[in-house]
């Protein structure tokens, strides 16, 4: 791999030990993927901010980096932590566990990481521009940045993201190269599905696309309109059930104004028809439990936007959550603050629902709750929570989730 004079000096230790270590990790990664050179990044986003992911090793590594004077070189934001920093006692998080997360927060703060604690950094202080190179991890954020914004990042692993932040570079391969961003698999929505594509079909379609496409780049035709939140839900599901880091939705995402643009000069390697039957079967697959009584409802995965907060507030205003049921809405502090100013938080909290800020069901230790059945409108939660929370999981629309919280039962999807 070609290295600049400055990069050679970094490797010689001229800029300190943290930068030397970080760049040598990135050079190894680049050599493994035949990168021709490094590329400067506009920002980094790191997942090792969570104690659940970083563990004791993270505390040790970050501690050593801080001692050696490490500072991030580009704007760097943190993914959700493993606690709600303001309410961890309310969520029954063990005190020693909370202490470990607080320690990680302190160390990252000393390195200059912006404590966004969110999987939607693009709703806070890390808003990429079209064509910018990034060094991001967090599958749902990576797929959003690549697909919806048209920025360029591979899906970095924990700690590699920190290395990228420390030197402000990543090796140039994969999704940094225009020729590697073209579509590979075509998903064609049937006309009748296309005509009446409902809000909760977005995470279901994402789940289906992820399963069928794996790590290839899917192109979807037939979606006529999609909101910010629908694209967020679609991408998060596709990145969870497959390892989709970039998708193109023809007529909607910026690198797919036409089908030809989405595929470049290539023909699709595979064409997959999607009808109502695929949607229904995938929804059944996403629910590993029967209709009936539930004990926890989880929405806001990926973290809720201000529009979603308004939607929850509208559905909950003047109502009361069923006794014995927990409805937790995951969000970041920026959205929480704005939602509070707009009166949404008041309506949500008066109903008995709780905001879970800076973390989520998936990242927090919830053993003390003994939950058995979770309902969610998120494809990513549907994929992970049976393992991470250990519950049966039922996927339903946002409205059906809120109804389940109010009645204690899920009867419709
Ligand atoms: Fe975010 Fe947690 Fe979902 S990190 S994408 S709310 S699983």
Image (cartoon, rainbow, N blue to C red):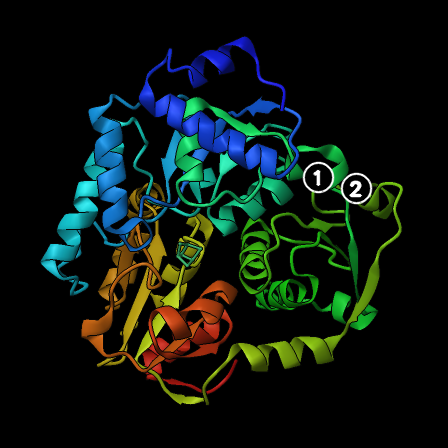
Q: CA distance from mark 1 to mark 2?
A: 6 Å
Residue under label 1, please give it: 254
Q: Count every numbered label the image shows and give the total.
A: 2
- Badge 2 element: loop
Is 124 positioned to the left or the right of 115 in the image? right
Dot 1 and dot 2 residues touching (CB under 8 Å): yes
Residue 187 or residue 55, whichever sits in front: 55
Q: Residue 46 at x, y = what percent?
A: 40, 40
Above or below: residue 334 compared with residue 186? above
Residue positioned 66% across, 39% down in the render:
174
- Name the residue: 82% across, 46% down: 263
At 84% from the left edge and 41% from the top edge, which residue is drawn?
A: 264
- Image location of residue 33, percent across then percent down: 63, 38
User: Where is ligand 1, by quadrant?
Assistant: bottom left
Q: Could you tell me if residue 124 is visible in this image?
A: no
Furthest toward the front, the residue is 12
Observer able to see residue 104 = yes
- Quadrant of residue 385 in the image? bottom left
Whether 216 is drawn above or below 198: the answer is above
x, y (%) of residue 65?
27, 29
The quadrant of the rendering that contains the N terminus is top right
């Amino acid at each position: 791999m070609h290295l600049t004079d400055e990069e050679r000096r970094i490797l010689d230790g001229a800029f300190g030990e943290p930068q030397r270590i970080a760049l040598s990790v990135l050079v190894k990664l680049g050599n493994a993927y035949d990168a021709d050179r490094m590329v400067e990044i506009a920002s980094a986003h790191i997942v090792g901010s969570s104690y659940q992911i970083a563990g004791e090793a993270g505390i040790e590594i970050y501690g050593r980096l801080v001692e050696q004077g490490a500072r991030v070189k580009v704007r760097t934001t943190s993914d959700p932590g493993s606690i709600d920093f303001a309410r961890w006692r309310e969520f029954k998080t063990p005190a020693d566990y909370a202490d470990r997360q607080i320690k990680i927060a302190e160390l990252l703060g000393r390195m200059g990481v912006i404590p966004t604690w969110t999987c939607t950094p693009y709703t806070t202080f890390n808003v990429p521009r079209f064509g910018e190179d990034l060094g991001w991890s967090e599958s749902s954020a990576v797929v959003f940045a690549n697909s919806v914004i048209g920025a360029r990042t591979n899906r970095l692993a924990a700690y590699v993201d920190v290395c990228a932040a420390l030197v402000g570079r990543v090796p140039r391969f994969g999704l940094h190269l225009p020729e590697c961003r073209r579509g590979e698999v075509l998903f064609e929505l049937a006309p009748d599905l296309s005509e009446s594509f409902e809000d909760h079909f977005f995470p279901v379609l994402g789940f289906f696309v992820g399963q069928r496409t794996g790590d290839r780049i899917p192109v979807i035709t037939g979606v006529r309109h999609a909101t910010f939140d629908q694209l967020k839900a679609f991408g998060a599901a596709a990145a969870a059930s497959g390892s989709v880091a970039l998708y193109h939705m023809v007529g909607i995402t910026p690198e797919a104004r036409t089908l030809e643009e989405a595929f470049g000069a290539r023909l699709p390697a595979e064409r997959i028809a999607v009808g109502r039957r695929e949607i229904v079967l995938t929804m059944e697959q996403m629910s590993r439990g029967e209709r009936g009584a539930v004990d926890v409802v989880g929405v806001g995965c990926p973290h809720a936007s201000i529009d979603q907060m308004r939607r929850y507030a509208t559905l909950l205003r003047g109502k009361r959550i069923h006794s014995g049921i927990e409805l937790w809405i995951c969000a970041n502090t920026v959205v929480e603050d704005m939602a509070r100013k707009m009166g949404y938080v008041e309506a949500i909290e008066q109903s008995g629902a709780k905001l879970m800020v800076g973390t989520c069901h998936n990242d927090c230790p919830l053993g003390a709750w003994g939950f058995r059945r979770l309902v969610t409108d998120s494809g990513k939660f549907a994929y992970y929570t049976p393992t991470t929370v250990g519950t049966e999981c039922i996927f339903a629309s946002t409205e059906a989730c809120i109804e389940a919280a109010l009645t204690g039962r899920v009867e419709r999807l």
